[in-house]
Amino acid sequence: MDAEKLIPLADIATTLESGGIDPILAPLYPGRDIGEARRRYGALVQSFADAFGDGGAALFSTPGRTEIGGNHTDHQHGCVLAGSVDMDIIAVVRPIADKLVRLRSDGYPETVVHLDSLAPNPAEFNQSSALVRGIAAQYTERGYPVSGLEIAMTSSVLKGSGLSSSAAFEVMLGTIMNHLFAGAVLTPVEVCTIGRYAENCYFGKPCGLMDQLACCVGGVQFIDFRDIDNPFIKKLSGDFRAHGLALCIIDSGADHADLTDEYSPIPREMGMMASHFGKQVLREVDKAAFVREIPVIRREAGDRAVIRALHFFGDNERTVREAEAVETGDIGRFLQFVNESGRSSHMYLQNVYPLGSSVHQDVGLALALCDELLGGRGGFRIHGGGFAGTVQAFVPLDMLDGFKSGIEAVFGGGRCHVVSIREAGSVRLK
């Protein structure tokens, strides 16, 4: 990127202080204090200057995401309903000539990545440096002149909150390189595909594409993964407050560590069901044919695999109807589907409790509290992968204060996060 296309840090700081950037910030943080957002960006600009010196830079924001419908449907090439939220990663960035990335993120040691070698390094698995290297490698392979970067970053996307802090980080890196090295020509799907590749092949974690897309595109999105490499994406209106609802993400405080043995059987068992019919994923299997074969399949793979497959068929169909309800503004029907999805995850998918857990059932308790506190109003469901982590609730605004205090009386202060859908995805601000 040419130096003249960067904005002097002093000019960015002055524009922030004067409120000149407020019209850009307001849509990113609906319902939040713009003065607080302005100060947050100003502090990051100062941190960047302290770390890397004065000069030109660019300003970016990438949101976290929430899964609204379709629990464990994406890896079977199904449909999901997801949305970008008003918690985000923000970054001040400067390209440099050296093949070196220096990344400073609040609360973490500085990450330094030498880009002379772009091959995967097993020693970097599960480290942010692996994502930097993998994304740089993909841009280089596509013919874009990747040099070095100086980055200062801070995040309000709570780690382990189910809002996909890791996907937001990948999308942020991809958006930065798209703007600074590729002339912003890559589509959101291409940026997300690069992030998924880096996570799979460099970070060492298998993942789909849903989290990255939900962070990149903005708004509420209906995503159909029938063609996994070219998903169909439709943006919908996501102003739930206009319908009298607050969107809450409840952190149960459950430990996320060592849950691979809980997560991995879900796609494996669904894959076994598909392979019985000579297919790769359940999206390719006819539900009626599957039901007819249950007496045979249960002997081959066991009952849990059958029940989990039934969850996929139900939640995949449900997500299509849920998206229609959002699009038409039928909020009562939407909430019906939210609750049905939650019951299906609990009863069929069985991703609420880790196997054998009888004393600590944090997510199950959070769901039970939602049921008690909402008293038949609103909607609630397991959020994301399950087994630990978070619950999603749509709470009538007239119940919000009592609901929040009731949840936090059990799980502790700051565990019920009220978020809003933001229409902008991953963007360059300046």
Image (cartoon, rainbow, N blue to C red):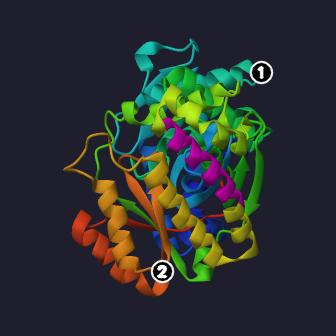
Residue 276 position (above or below residue 45):
above
Please name which of the two marks, 2 or 1, marks the residue nearer to the observer: 2
The residues tagged by marks 2 and 1 sit, at their Cα atoms, a distance apart of: 54 Å
Residue 41 visible in rendering: no
Q: Quadrant of residue 259?
A: top left
Judged by its main secondary structure, the magenta piece is: helix
Q: Is residue 109 left or right of residue 99?
A: left
Q: Position of residue 37 (x, y in %)?
A: 49, 65
Q: Position of residue 109 (x, y in %)?
A: 34, 34
Q: Quadrant of residue 96?
A: top right
Q: Residue at x 66, y 37 (%)?
A: 282
Question: The N terminus appears in which quarter of the rendering?
Answer: top right
Badge 1 element = loop
Q: Is residue 286 left or right of residue 388?
A: right
Badge 2 element = loop
Could you say which is closer to the camera, residue 335 or residue 128?
A: 335
Q: Does the segment drawn in magenta span residue 311?
A: yes
Determine which residue is flagged by label 1. Answer: 143
Q: Residue furthest left?
A: 359
Highlighted range, magenta: 305-320
Q: Does the segment drawn in magenta span residue 357?
A: no
Q: Residue at x 59, y 38 (%)?
A: 294
Label 1 CA crowd tier, 10 Å (few <14, some 14–19, many 20+): few
Could you say which is closer to the camera, residue 306 or residue 27?
A: 306
The amino acid on which the numbered mark 1 sits, given as a three-letter code, is: Gly
Determine which residue is flagged by label 2. Answer: 377
Q: Is residue 3 left or right of residue 123?
A: right
Q: Position of residue 23 (x, y in %)?
A: 66, 71
Q: Position of residue 105 (x, y in %)?
A: 42, 42
